[in-house]
């Protein structure tokens, strides 16, 4: 997915977009330039938090990231640019900024899935700022025309107007119980967001609790992650469930009934990003049905 | 002799100091102001010390900072009892009756504030990741603070509370029914707040306005007016008109970056 860099140019190891490398931070995603890349033995790269007060340019506007615990994305919108967002993430705005609605399709399904039914849009000129409600990192994902990423629900902060937003079923589920007692579980949520840049370069900002780690998966390479830890992935990365059943000392403590581990398998090629804070999966009863999954008894 | 002016509280400091003697802000930091004019509250270095009256305050930790006070004889601080992290056994305590019992009960605010008297050590913290904001108050200053955000105030401050006027402001303002008001009379005082996430401050000119998410409001000078203003946008199928807090100058406005969106159900 990397773009060939121009001769003598600096290619950001995080967003893979070339720039002249003369600034302290990448102008496309805000990652520090010339950072000493720290790769764990297992291949995960810790994505450095965007430096305080770093500026990201998009179209004719700027985005400045300020703060470190719960960073604020402060956008200076040119009068030809607009962004969209969920109203929960708006922190402050200049009165001149024109606020409006951006209706979404699939209202009933979105309501059932706990997603916002209506996005807001803000048209420049003026300053407007966004923040999330958990300590963590703001992640900038610059998108080239036609490039897409899949984002887990509720990680989205704000995107530029030329980034097309769509959503689809995550198709990651399992059931426990039977009959009237059947419970449906969606470890990733019922839906997953897809963002595609159209026409020109776009900018997508996400917020992830805790720290963020990214890695490239080679074709066919698999990695197991906590379902609640996934932030985003390239669409080329496929995913399915994996259940592990540790052996219990007694039949009623058997993992088959209580202590199973539920993992999400990610299979390359492509990039994946995970966060260090995630919701612990609940212990549930015996699984009766599921989306495509592998199992392992030990 | 040259003096170093603190960019946060404007106090004059002796040359060679690395942090302000009045509020603890780093003095050698560059002035961090966003393009839109918001200044970051100074991130106090771990173990930063500064003085007030004859006492010493030390800020410890960085994720959920603790304000540790070494109170001198004759000095005291008041606070909501649940923010006290620890104290030395010998620190005398007393109560500060806030008045307005029924009103405060309706507003979900404590009836009685606790007072810790010197000599001795006492420490305070809140229960969320964020920053301790140090606000020195000079005589005749009045500061309004959202409820449950203040950590401790020194004895020279006068504490009261003001009702948020207007039903729309109460219902949609995100700040509850009351705001804490802190006033200094004759001698300077020190107010410690806890802001969730990061804290930013902007000084509004006369008549200048800014729209703020109500849950993000942290403090303001009493000269700044605050009104919940309905926006002509939908936030759901049956929900119309989200509310933002319109702050109008002159004066300072402080916001926090982590908040619970008031309209979230």
Image (cartoon, coloured by chain):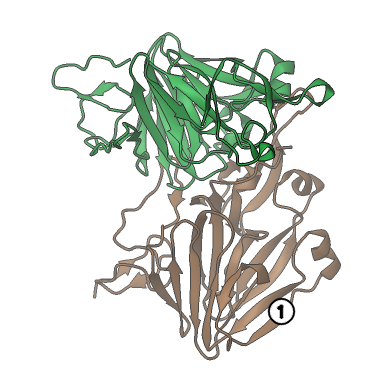
Residue A205 visible, this orientation: no
Host chain of mark 1: B
Please tell me in which quadrant of the rendered image residue B128 appears.
Answer: bottom right
Percent x, y for residue A96? 56, 32
- Relative to A139, is B13 above or below? below
Q: Is residue A19 left or right of residue B161?
A: left
- Relative to B92, is A278 above or below? above
Percent x, y for residue B121? 51, 81
Q: Residue at x 59, y 20 (%)?
A: A172
Look at chain B in the picture and name its colour.
brown
The residue wearing badge 1 is B96
Percent x, y for residue A218? 33, 17
State the residue lying farthest toward the right. Answer: B102
Percent x, y for residue A254? 63, 36
Q: Which residue is drawn at 77% across and 55% down?
A: B177
State the residue lying farthest toward the front. Answer: A250
Q: Residue at x 27, y 27 (%)?
A: A12
In what quadrant of the picture does the N terminus of chain A appear?
top left
Disc 1 crowd, CA 10 A, few/some/many (<14, 14-19, 20+): some
Q: Which residue is drawn at 37% across and 62% down?
A: B45
SS label for mark 1: strand
State the residue lying farthest toward the bottom. Answer: B73
State the residue lying farthest toward the left. Answer: A8
Report the chain shown in green.
A
Q: In this view, does A208 lie to the left or right of A167?
A: left
């Amino acid at each position: 997915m990397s773009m060939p860099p121009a001769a003598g140019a600096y290619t950001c190891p995080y967003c893979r977009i070339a720039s002249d490398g003369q600034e302290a931070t990448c102008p496309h995603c805000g990652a520090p330039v010339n950072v000493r890349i720290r790769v764990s033995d297992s291949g995960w790269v810790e994505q450095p938090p965007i430096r305080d007060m770093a500026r990201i340019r998009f179209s004719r506007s700027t985005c400045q990231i300020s703060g470190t615990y719960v960073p604020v994305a402060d956008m200076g919108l040119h009068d030809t640019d607009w962004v969209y967002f969920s109203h929960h993430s708006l922190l402050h705005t200049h009165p001149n900024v024109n606020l409006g609605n951006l209706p979404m399709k699939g209202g009933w399904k979105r309501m059932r899935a706990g997603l916002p039914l209506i996005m807001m849009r803000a048209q420049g000129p003026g300053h407007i700022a966004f923040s999330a409600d958990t300590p963590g990192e703001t992640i900038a994902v610059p998108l080239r025309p036609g490039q897409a990423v899949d984002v887990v629900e509720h990680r989205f902060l704000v995107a530029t107007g030329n980034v097309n937003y769509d959503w689809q079923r995550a198709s990651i589920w399992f059931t426990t119980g039977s009959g009237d007692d059947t419970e449906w579980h969606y470890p990733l949520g019922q839906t997953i967001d897809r963002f595609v840049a159209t026409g020109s370069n776009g900018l997508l900002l996400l917020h992830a609790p805790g720290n963020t780690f990214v890695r490239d998966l080679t074709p066919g390479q698999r990695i197991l992650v906590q379902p609640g830890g996934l932030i985003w992935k390239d669409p080329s990365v496929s995913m399915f469930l994996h259940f592990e059943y540790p052996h219990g000392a007694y039949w009623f403590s058997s993992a088959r009934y209580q202590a199973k581990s539920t993992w999400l398998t990610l299979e390359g090629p492509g990039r994946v990003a995970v966060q260090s804070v995630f919701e612990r999966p609940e212990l549930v009863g015996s699984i009766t049905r599921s989306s495509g999954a592998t199992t392992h008894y030990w | 002799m040259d003096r170093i002016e603190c960019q946060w509280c404007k106090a004059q400091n002796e040359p060679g100091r690395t942090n302000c003697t009045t509020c603890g802000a780093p003095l050698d930091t560059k002035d961090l102001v966003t393009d839109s004019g918001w200044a970051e509250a100074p991130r106090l270095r771990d173990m930063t010390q500064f003085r007030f009256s004859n006492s010493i305050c030390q800020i410890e930790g960085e994720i959920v900072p603790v304000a540790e006070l070494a109170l001198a004889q004759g000095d005291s601080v008041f606070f909501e009892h649940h923010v006290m992290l620890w104290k030395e056994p010998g620190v005398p305590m007393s109560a500060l009756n806030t008045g307005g019992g029924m009103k405060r009960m309706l507003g979900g605010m404590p009836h009685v504030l606790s007072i810790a008297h010197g000599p001795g050590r006492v420490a305070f913290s809140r229960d969320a990741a964020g920053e301790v904001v140090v606000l020195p108050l000079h005589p005749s200053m009045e500061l309004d603070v959202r409820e449950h955000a203040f950590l401790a105030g020194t004895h020279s401050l006068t504490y009261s509370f003001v009702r948020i006027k207007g039903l729309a402001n109460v219902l949609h303002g995100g700040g509850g029914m009351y705001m804490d008001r802190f006033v200094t009379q004759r001698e300077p005082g020190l107010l410690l707040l806890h802001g969730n996430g990061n804290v930013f401050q902007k000084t509004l000119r006369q008549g200048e306005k800014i729209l703020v998410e109500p849950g993000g409001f942290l403090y303001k000078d009493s000269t700044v007016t605050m009104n919940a203003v309905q926006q002509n946008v939908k936030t759901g199928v049956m929900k119309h008109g989200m509310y933002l807090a319109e702050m109008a100058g002159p004066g300072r406005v402080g916001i926090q970056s982590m908040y619970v969106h008031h309209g979230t159900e």
